[in-house]
Amino acid sequence: MLENFLDQTTFSSQADFMANFKVKVPVDFNFGYDVVDRWAAEAPDKKALCWTNDKGEHIDFTFADIKRESDKTASYFQQLGIGHGDMVMLILKRRYEFWFSIIALHKIGAVCIPATHLLTEKDIIYRCNAADIKMVVAVGEDIVTGHVDRSVADSPSLKYRVSVGPSVPEGWEDFHKGIDSAPAFVRPEHANSNDDISLLYFTSGTTGNPKMVAHDFTYPLGHIITGSFWHNLNEQSLHLTLADTGWGKAVWGKLYGQWIAGANVFVYDFDKFTPADVLVMIEKYHITSFCAPPTVFRFLIREDLSKYNITSLKYCTIAGEALNPKVYEEFFRITGIKLMEGFGQTETTLTVATYPWVEPKPGSMGVTNPQYDVALLTNDGRWAEDGEQGQIVIRTDKGRPLGLFKEYYRDAEKTREAYHDNIYYTGDVAWRDEDGYFWFVGRADDVIKSSGYRIGPFEVESALMTHPAVVECAITGVPDEVRGQVVKATIVLAAAYKDKAGDELVKEIQDHVKHVTAPYKYPRVVEFVDELPKTISGKIRRVEIRDKDKQSE
């Protein structure tokens, strides 16, 4: 399949990759027809999805199965009046119906809006009205359907509620009855153009209401690098990305790039994350490739890995937050596997990463993806030199790259703020070393300016996380008459240390940071809390900590 979109499919070095990676973009590309259905025609018995759950159920789906079920789903959606450009929200957790539904929506040219089951009534109302959502397809669980039901009165665009089970409440359509009774699917004469919107994500921003990130139909092609050259997948791979389908990471790791590479996608449907259960899955199903955030790997290295036969695992990638070098080193010591880091946003595909031919530097995000012209821009408008901090930007004067978002839907002002004069501003700060590796510093708004130094939250948080008392932490700046700002650490303590919270522990933690990183970065202010404020996707809301500090001045 890869050769359908690339003239050159193997690369020996980063220089070779940068010079020769080129994607051939078909006219009116549609992932449903041009990837899923093509696999079904060429290799119908090839496994596409290996699904299991924490109840012991297990189903394997071939590409022929995915074609058949997505066609039935597309026909059913058409019967409900869903067609080109209609907005459909999927709240499906890790249910296999997500794959049927998103492919079906692509096939009929509708817009898929993946969403988390953690949304409240208020969240659903906001999304329905912001995007004129016409249909919600959701898991038939009381907490989810209840929130949707309570949103109906204030969501005039919402016409249909469809449940995939286990229950089908009053007022809801039955997904499985619907697809089983739908007539044979007839492909629309013209399902889409390349620049039509196919995918819409509500970003869980750390400030303000979520923005609507719109991607066009070519977006899946931007993930060829994700699947084939970051996850390092091939047709024999069984790949697990640990992500709920409500988040962008799901299509990064459980769909587009993986199926273009011909890999089998492993899905473990669970309600509560347990590190030991993930290790059991790797052992039982012989998973070959695994991607998860650093937090997951922190949990895994605390397990006794000698109890599990995970020798099938050959490749591991990491993203979602910056990687603490200590986690890298410990996982490598135990398994011999190097964690290959990557960076990107909801607005992009993989932007910077560590590829198979690139030797990882623990804590670095890696090097540039050839799809993107990545640079660092200083506060005074200069292109940053090596070793100098700057905002990560993507230059588009030579062309708009595959995978870069189309717009913030219905918000031209915010689109212009982030993307103007052929530059997309990511809002993330990093520095680049002399070898071209990028090192994450923090969000531009979170960088602390103290006594002339620019201090990124991540580097201090990484130092704090190596102290056994610290379970979670957030670094912010607080105003100071002499230094402008000083570093503040807001810390959630481990259970064994909670009764030791006091001046002595504060001093111990401060001294620890001074020894682990540059002494000027140590937190002069330390606060112990029970929990940190977070967005619905689990990102720390440092702005809320700063606002609280301002109110208490």
Image (spheres, rainbow, N blue to C red):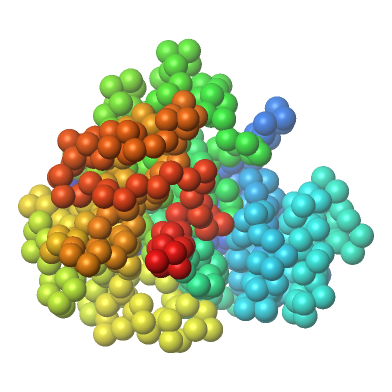
Instruction: Point out residue 60 in the picture as x, y percentages from the top left corner.
Output: 64, 36
What residue is shown at x 36% (from left), y 82% (from top)? 417
Q: Image quadrant of residue 375?
A: bottom left
What residue is shown at x 27% (from left), y 81% (from top)? 422
Q: Is residue 550 above or below residue 246?
A: below
Q: Image quadrant of residue 517?
A: top left
Instruction: Point out residue 395 in the picture as x, y percentages from the top left corner.
Output: 24, 74
103 lies left or right of 464: right
217 lies left or right of 324: right
Query: The C terminus appears in which quarter of the rendering?
Result: bottom left
What residue is shown at x 34% (from left), y 79% (from top)? 419
Q: In this view, does 537 lie above or below 337?
A: below
Query: Depth check: 252 or 503 in front?
Result: 503
91 lies left or right of 424: right
Instruction: Point out residue 506 in the picture as x, y percentages from the top left corner.
Output: 32, 39
Q: Is residue 356 visible?
A: no
Number of numbered callouts drawn: 0
View extreme (right): residue = 170
What residue is shown at x 63% (from left), y 52% (from top)? 99
View extreme (top): residue = 307
Instruction: Point out residue 423 in the picture as x, y percentages from the top left corner.
Output: 27, 77
Q: Is residue 464 above or below residue 134?
A: above
Q: Is residue 528 visible?
A: yes
113 lies left or right of 120: left
